[in-house]
Image (cartoon, helix red, strand yellow):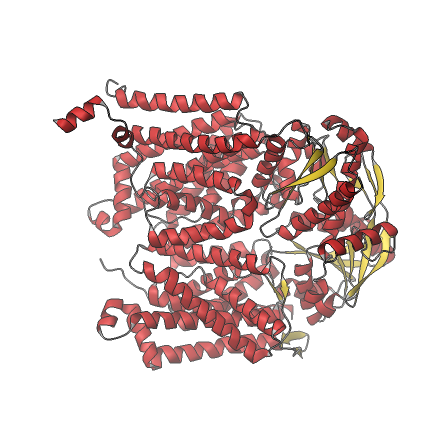
Amino acid sequence: MEFLQQLINGLALGSVYALLALGYTMVYGIIQLINFAHGEIYMIGAFAGFYSASTLKLPLIPTLLVAMAVSALAGIIIEKVAYKPLRNSPRIALLITAIGVSLFLQNAMRLLVGSNPKPFPDLINAGSINIGSIQIEVKTILMFGVSALLVILLQFIVYKTKVGKAMRASSQDMEAASLMGINVDNTISLTFAIGSALAGIAGVLVAISYPSITPYMGAMPGLKAFVAAVLGGIGSIPGALVGGIAIGLLETFSKAYISTNFSDAIVFAILIIILLIKPAGLLGKKISVKV
Amino acid sequence: MKKTLLSGVLASVMAMTLLIGCGGNTGSSTSGATGDVIKIGAIGPLSGAASTYGISVKEGAQLLEKEVNDAGGINGKKIEFIFEDDQAEPNSAMQAFNKLVDNEKVCAILGPVTSGATLAVAQNATSKQIPMITPTATEPTITKQGGDYMFRGCFVDSFQGEVLGKYASETLKSKTAAVLYNAGSDYSKGIADSFKSKFEAASGTVGEFLTYNDKDTDFKAQLTKIKTLNPDVIVLPDYYNVVGLIAKQAREMGITSQFLGGDGWESEELTKIGGDAVNGALYINHYYSSDQDVAVKTFVDSYKKEYNKEPDAFAALSYDTSKILVKAIEKVGKTDGAAIKDALAGMEMNSVTGNIKFGSDRSAIKSAAIIKVDGDKKVLADKVNP
Amino acid sequence: MKNFFNKKTITIILGVLITYAVLFGLISANVINSYYKGIITFSLINIILAVSLNLIVGFTGQLCLGHAGFMSIGAYVSALISQKAGMPFVVSIFIGAIVACIFAALIGYPTLKLTGDYFAITTLAFGEIIRIIIMNINVVGGARGFTGIPIKTTFTVAFVFMVISIIVIKNVINSSQGRAMLSVRENEIAAESMGINAFKYKMMAFVIAAFFAGLAGGLYAHYAGYIKPDSFDFNKSIDYLTFVVFGGMGSLSGSVIAATVLTFLPELLRGMGDFRMVIYPLALILLMIFRPEGLLGDKEVSLNIIKNILPDKKSKDRKEA
């Protein structure tokens, strides 16, 4: 029985990572950048949601929309200001910039709002469902449902729409895509916008379930979500969902049955093992490097 | 190779010399007193993640500084607290210490605030013969590491754990307990360990002794295990923002055990984060802010007047610790480190956080207040004397 | 030997000795007080960290985000040996450095064949894993930290080790192995097709860098007397990366200057603690966008600058001729 409950716990945690991993995977898929600042966009979404829910007193859906909009905007601005100028620079410069953006956002937010954790209002007051001695919170079901829905939606967008085609083309070969008349800049901005909006939704949903938000809340989940994206196969959208759930389960079971002290270390160790054995991840494709 | 070496070294020398030149002018006169001002150093996190604690300490000390100076100072001289930021970082604390002692030539130091930073500078107090008293660092070995000149104005983590253990078994008559503490926090671990020893010594059983990592927000894995145990009490020795979340998740899972906590629970925000989940919880604090005792009331009122908010335990401890330090300096009459430290060792005072006097290990022997969360108010459940 | 004692070497040696003597004199006469001495010693340790990280990031082109992890291994091992086994200071820091080296070899062996981004994340992951493991080892204090380390790192000691580190690393760079590393940085595939075993040279750089990071860690432990796992976290690794990037990836003198300046700067800006944490990353971003080569790019500070400033007979003659 306890095992089943832990399973539910793991799935709940996993859907958070899945939502974040989706953003990572989309951005990496298109410009091969590990967006270190993704965790911070998630944090910005949470704070945007906080202000809309407690200061403007908006209910759930408008709060989510506000968070999505603010995060998307943040994502686009970061892309235009920090990543676009470096599109032709060596990878190391891009990575360092991404780290810089991440740290900058964390500390700037802290200067703005103070380091005291803020209590997020409970916008989904729906209790939980009890099946025997197992308890499933409605919030959990919601998060899981939203993640799954978004994956389906994204798959549809990427594989069945024109914009999606533009995204896939740009990720294959940017120059060729622009020669074909695709506005690569806009496509990239759109990708960032979508990925960031997803992070924003994740931020609000997580803030409702774990109602204490701080400027540093994005750091660890960001890192773990990245591990999830890699595990599932970076660049693969269903991979993000699979990876997220997997990491959530792994972390929960490590905490429950191995050791809480080392659960983070175990998650990172998994990353290393995946990269060594199957760098393409579970659902990813192997890419060969051309000279 | 050779050019680089020389050039690199030359450049460093130039840089260093320039900066030394700038700095060399800020040394002041006689030790600890410039004309009419007695300088007391203070170290704490004024920026960074732990800044709320440092700022509370600063406010408490400055409130005392104002009171003392308005009443004419000590022995005719005014006092001045000079604050240096350590960002709760051991290396910065050391540099802050050096700056205060070498450049500002303070006669005594209040601080540091966090245990890590204090452990880093403790032994310097004795090697440089500067009396140092930390108002809030609770790690037990600090005064031992620091030597004769290192004092502490609050009780230690092990004391908190013991009080909780004793209270749980004797007053609450609990038989089983679970502990869920922060593996990345020495403070949390300290209370958890001493609770376990005391509770088990009183024939209680600690059925689950679990941890979580710093910055974790999901505790369901651990709480599920605790739920299976169904203990009488659950000890959560961490800060209010984390325990609020834990309590909430626990109650949502249907866990009904009594929550017990340490002084980290104390905050205005506790009920905002924990909501109904923390109702009825009991935790230890250094004092009770609504205590009708005159000393407490006066302090709380003047703090509110000055800073427009309720004082937290850090501010109260800082106020008391500064007060006893200043009294020691006043008693000695001059800024002699050795004399001040001797005077401090023998001092006794009644103030906001109760009766303060120092044990042979230079830690303050103080009583603890056990606070109960009642709705969004806090009431005094008990007072425990050491 | 005849070639060794030429004019250049003597100038260098004299320069170093004079610098040392000047600083030492100032410190002994208490013109430089403990506060500044502390900062200077700390900056010497940071120089060692910066030049070692530069070897792998700047000269071999591999982004490493776990440098603080190797530093912490060196710090903890040397502290343990110093305090518990009572061995002499120099022995314990060397052992610490060697252990850090061994870990680097173990970690590098499987991971150095990954491409740049993944290698970076892996080093980050390892840095975290090392920190978490240390936090759970009670013998070294765990989260409480390791107290009571004998304070043995004086200005002299730090200065000597800094000089040694720079000499060694500069020698590595000027050797054929160093050139191989540079070729790996420029274009790994082209280097491989020229017969250079990229993996071998990346390993070499990684292990040497870790050795000096461990050495610096040992020096730091015996300078501060107290260390805790959080003192070596990801943020610290980023600090060291900032030194390298700022000074110029590929310039040793740049690293020296950057490490010194960026150690003194936070002290000078003591009142602005909160802003520093915003300005540093911002500076990193702006640097990458507008001047990715950093202060000195991949050039070194050379005596030619001084020659050009001070006109002397020979160069005047040369110009006229």
The image position of residue C190, as x and y in percent, is 21, 50
Q: Could you tell me which residue is drawn at 19 percent across and 23 percent down?
A: C314
Q: Residue furthest left?
A: C321
Q: Is residue B331 left or right of residue A203?
A: right
For residue A96, above or below residue B377:
above
Q: Could you tell me which residue is drawn at 74 percent across and 65 percent down?
A: B278
Count every numbered label the image shows and give the total.
Answer: 0
Considering depth in this image, is B67 or A197 the residue closer to the camera?
Answer: B67
For residue A158, above or below residue C257:
below
The image position of residue C7, as x and y in percent, is 26, 20
Considering depth in this image, is A24 or C87 the residue closer to the camera?
Answer: A24
In the rendered image, the quadrant that contains the N terminus of chain A is bottom right
Q: Could you tell me which residue is drawn at 35 percent across and 34 percent down?
A: C169
Q: Could you tell me which residue is drawn at 59 percent across and 36 percent down?
A: B94
Q: Is residue A33 visible?
A: no
Considering depth in this image, is A11 or B21 the residue closer to the camera?
Answer: B21
Q: Is residue A172 visible?
A: yes
For residue C278, above or below residue C158:
below
The answer to which image quadrant residue C52 occupies is top left
Q: Is residue A41 left or right of residue B225?
A: left
For residue C182, above or below residue C116:
above
The image position of residue A259, as x and y in percent, is 60, 55
